[in-house]
Amino acid sequence: MAQAIAGQNYLNQPPTVVEQVLTGTFADGLGRVQRVPDRIGFDPFPWHSMAIWIMTQMRR
């Protein structure tokens, strides 16, 4: 998944960085590796406010 969304036309980031964000395993910049598997949460409910935000971003 990281490879699919890392490209220049989407996130424009190295796949390794995207993978670290998605898995929650990343270097903290102080020489340690952090493991935070629930760092990103997904809410499958289609909130109206989120739909409005997505539409404004797509318009940009």
Image (cartoon, grey):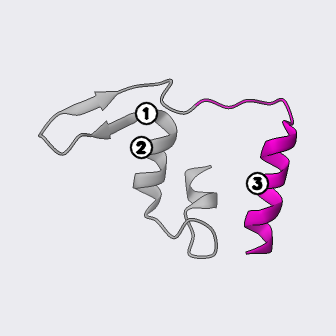
Q: Where is 30 relative to 11, above or below?
A: above
Q: Which residues are magenta?
A: 41-60
Disc 1 residue crowd, few under 14, some 14–19, many 20+, Cα 10 Å = some
For marks 2 and 1, give the CA distance: 6 Å
Which amino acid lies under the numbered mark 2 shown in the image of this protein?
A: Gln
Q: Which of the numbered marks, if any, corresponds to residue 20? A: 2
Q: Is residue 58 magenta?
A: yes
Above or below residue 38? Residue 2 is below
- The residue beneath circle 3 is 53
Residue 35 % position (x, y)? 34, 26
Q: Residues within 10 Å of mark 3 (few under 14, many from 20)?
A: few
Residue 24: in magenta span: no
Query: In the image, which is nearer the foreground, mark 3 or mark 2?
Result: 3
Dots 2 and 1: beta carbons under 8 Å? yes
Q: CA distance from mark 3 to mark 1?
A: 25 Å
Q: Residues within 10 Å of mark 2 (few under 14, many from 20)?
A: some
Mark closest to the chain's N terminus, 3 or 1: 1
Give how far across and how far down residue 54 sits, in percent: 78, 56
Determine the image quadrant of residue 34: top left
32 vs 60, left or right, is left
Q: Secondary structure at mark 2?
A: helix
Q: Quick one: which residue is furthest to the left in this view?
A: 31
58 up-or-down from 21: above or below: below
The first of marks 3 and 2 along the sequence is 2
Question: Is 52 situated left or right of 22 in this image?
Answer: right
Q: Label 3 is placed on what type of residue?
A: Trp
Q: How many marks?
A: 3
The amino acid beneath tag 1 is Gly
Secondary structure under tag 3 reads helix
The residue identified by callout 1 is: 24
